[in-house]
Amino acid sequence: MDWATYPHTTDSGITQQIFQERIGRDPEAAELDKLKSSFVSMLSEEYDSNSSGFAAIAGASAALSRLKGESDWAVAIATGCWRESALLKLRAAEIDIDQIPAAFAEDGLSREAILQFAVSRSLEYYRPGSFAKTVSIGDGVWDVRTARSLNFAFLGVGRGASAAKLNRAGAKHVIEDFADYARLVSFLNDAEIPGSESPG
């Protein structure tokens, strides 16, 4: 399935579209609860049978921990996943997001809405008044498009063909992983709002 073909590449957006296409209406609250429960149950079963599929990108946990201690940066989590499934994946990857503002699929239908919610929660949590710069980090072309739409700077994560797709989508910088912390911070400082997409 090519998630990039969906108007909103979030659990909430994909769920709504499937319900509209198959049933002709939005899902009811009870249906959403049942779907989320089933999804998390299947994720748990998959983790039990193949935990390697939930491994974090190299250096992610350490980099996040170090960024939390940086006075120049305020860290937040924004994901298109449902909250419970996102927390399961993060725990499985041994990534601690305690004391980090976060926004999930429950907070918005679109990625733009979720990122804006994460920024809003960050302003409440860190109380800086405003942020001089917001950098979104992502691994999908939809993440590049979302950053461009919101006028956020962007840093891509990917390698090979995935990195090339992010570059074509407009990302100035793409890193393979988070193992080189100095390089990560350098790219965060240098990150820019994505440019126009290239054909192909």
Image (cartoon, grey):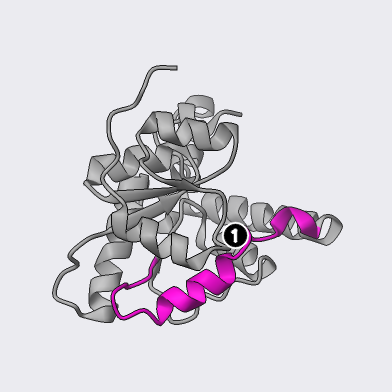
Q: What is the three-letter code of the residue carrying label 1?
A: Ser
Rendering coords of residue 60 (x, y %): 56, 65
Identify which residue is drawn at 66% across, 58% down: 40
**Picture quarter containing residue 127?**
bottom left
Please say whether residue 179 is one of the residues in the magenta stretch: no
Residue 4 or 189: which is nearer the viewer?
A: 189
Residue 142 or 179: which is nearer the viewer?
A: 179
Please say whether residue 75 is one of the residues in the magenta stretch: yes
Extreme top residue here?
Answer: 200
The N terminus lies in which quarter of the figure?
A: top right
Rendering coords of residue 17 (x, y %): 46, 33
Start and end of the magenta stretch? 51-76
Identify which residue is drawn at 44% across, 54% down: 105
**Picture quarter containing residue 49?**
bottom right
Extreme left residue here?
Answer: 129
Which residue corresponds to mark 1? 85
Rendering coords of residue 45 (x, y %): 79, 57
Residue 51 or 32: which is nearer the viewer?
A: 51
Identify which residue is drawn at 39% across, 31% down: 169
Rendering coords of residue 181 (x, y %): 49, 67
Number of disc labels: 1
How many neighbours does mark 1 have within 10 angstroms: few (below 14), some (14-19), or many (20 or more)?
Answer: many
Whether 185 is drawn above or below 29: the answer is: below
Horizontal side of 159 relative to 183 (left or right) equals right
The C terminus lies in which quarter of the figure?
A: top left
Horizontal side of 122 relative to 14 (left or right) equals left
Residue 171 or 22: which is nearer the viewer?
A: 171
Horizontal side of 174 relative to 41 (left or right) equals left
